[in-house]
Image (spheres, rainbow, N blue to C red):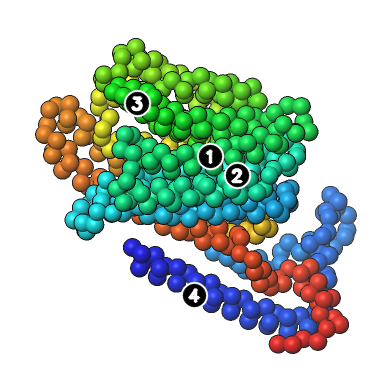
Amino acid sequence: MIIVAGLIIVVLKFLSIYNNILRRRESRETQKEIESLSPEELKVYEQREREIKAELYGNELSGNVPPSDEKGVIQNINYVEELRVFPTKRRTSSLQKYTSSELNKLILYFLGTAIFWLIIGTTFGLYAGIKYVAPDVEHTSWLSFGRLRPAHTNAVFWGWASLAMVGLSYYVVTRVSNVENYNIKQGYLSLILINAAVLAGTISVLAGVNNGGGEYREYIWPIMITFGIGIALSTHNLFRPVTKRTTKEIYISNWYIISGAMFIVIVILVGYIPLWQDGVGETITQGYYMHQAIGMWFMMINLGLMYYFLPQQLNKPIYSYSLGALAFWTHILFYTLIGTHHFIFSAIPWRLQTTAIIASAGMLIPVAAGTTNFILTFNGAWYQLKTSYTLPFYFMSIIFYFTGSFQGTVEAFRYTNLLWHFTDFTVSHSHLTMYGIITFMIWAFCYTLIPRLTGKEPPKLLVGIHFWLALIGLLFYVIALMIGGTQTGLMWMKKKPFIDGVINMFPFWLWRAIGGTMMWISHLIFAYNFYRMVRPKDDIKVPKTPAEILAAKRQLKNTEFNP
């Protein structure tokens, strides 16, 4: 896998160098042609420029005036400049910069390190998925499934998603507060501590040193406390613009972002302080930690970012501020109660299990309110989906938000819990939410924000390939595991031997590996797109339109051309 990844990088770099050589050659040839333009040819371009700028007055077809094409509409009607099957999409917002260069740099470091952990974490996940199909591929203890799986989940949780969300929050909080009041050094210290924690945690988990008490709690306490301190520093930093805001109201994005940043510090303390972690208390703590990390950290922050970026991309306000407030408070009310719905039929008191089930059903309220709010914001702007390369990520993440959250509610009921729990259906659900909702949202926000910070856009075709590989790969992954997990659950309910369920899952695990491979390749493309958006060198621009050709001619008028 490492060799293949290296070869892919080498090929992409070679193609990039070759493309630059061709562009430079085309630029030199174009400059020669522009320099040698005759007065007659210049008049043609000037006439074409006037045609492009011409306006119609409504009476062109009346009277005896001979027909003319002053607008130049009928020119080159048989010429196709690009392949129609790959239409070039555009951004739906400007590249205007609103923040300082120091803050821009900090945000890009957060996003860059996040993408590093996306590649590392999903490489672990892909290899773990391949081991389902080829379990005897190797027998290295550091790469055993029991270590790869937590290395994968924690790297994408605390490395990829967390770093990206914090970086994006630094931009949104200051924009909606209308004041930039950060301690940049404190931001960098937060960045270093979070990355150090994820690096140390990954190495320790692969080495077999872990907190084996619960899922997503595999990092030992000194490492997770380091992560928590890093988040706390950024939380304090994010409070500063809100307290010094120039507007009276606190926009709902900041409600979500500040609440999520506060909750995750509390969740880490509750999950790692050992006072209540004995017997059944350990199980209840695990349910609380696992679900609060997902719902009150990842979901809260991303929903807050969505309330800023989606209206901005559509160039229209959010459909209903009241629906947003309803979704916010009901999210806090119900999500904090649902942790134990993962332990139905356990030794946890029956009343707590029932409370978790009721709260899970109550989650339909914030999910329906949020989804309705986002979808109706698209109202009157659906046509933009066909021309924007960022909005498809937004739209699919909203669809996954509803379907994944609704699926979580359905899983909480006693019969469905008996059917699906401990099967691959749960793995499908976690990827439908953490990947379909959280990761697709982060990609949408990155493609929206990074060009603003750098002034450079990604290759449109590669953005499309990234989107479709990730989407199709995810659908292969989750649909296969949902079908296979349901079949396995039904077999177990009929008292079939455990091994029968394993044999039944083999073809579905193959589809899981195929889908996971497509998703992983899309991450490499996303990383390359990020590189294209932040690389310092300028793109070689070849004049093509009449205005560009005339401007280049004016620039070369008093200069000597040196090939």
Residue at coordinates 61% horizontally, 26% vertically from top-left?
Answer: 324
Q: Amino acid at mark 4?
A: Phe
Disc with the residue nearer the chain's start (2 vs 1): 2
Q: Is residue 537 left or right of residue 245?
A: left
Residue at the spot 51% in from the left edge and 19% down from the top edge? 333
Of helix, strand and loop, which one carries label 1?
Answer: helix
Q: Quadrant of residue 320?
A: top right
Q: Which residue is mark 1?
A: 229
> For mark 2, what is the residue?
168
Q: CA distance from mark 3 to mark 2?
A: 35 Å
Disc nearest the viewer among 3 and 4: 3
Crowd around label 2: few <14 · some 14–19 · many ≥20 (10 Å): many
Residue 111 position (above or below residue 157): below
- Residue that carries the numbered disc 4 in the rendered image: 14
Give SS at disc 4.
helix
x and y percentages locating residue 9 in the rendered image: 45, 68
**SS type, badge 2:** helix
Q: CA distance from mark 4 to mark 1?
A: 42 Å
Looking at marks 3 and 2 on the same chain, the residue that comes earlier in the sequence is marked by 2
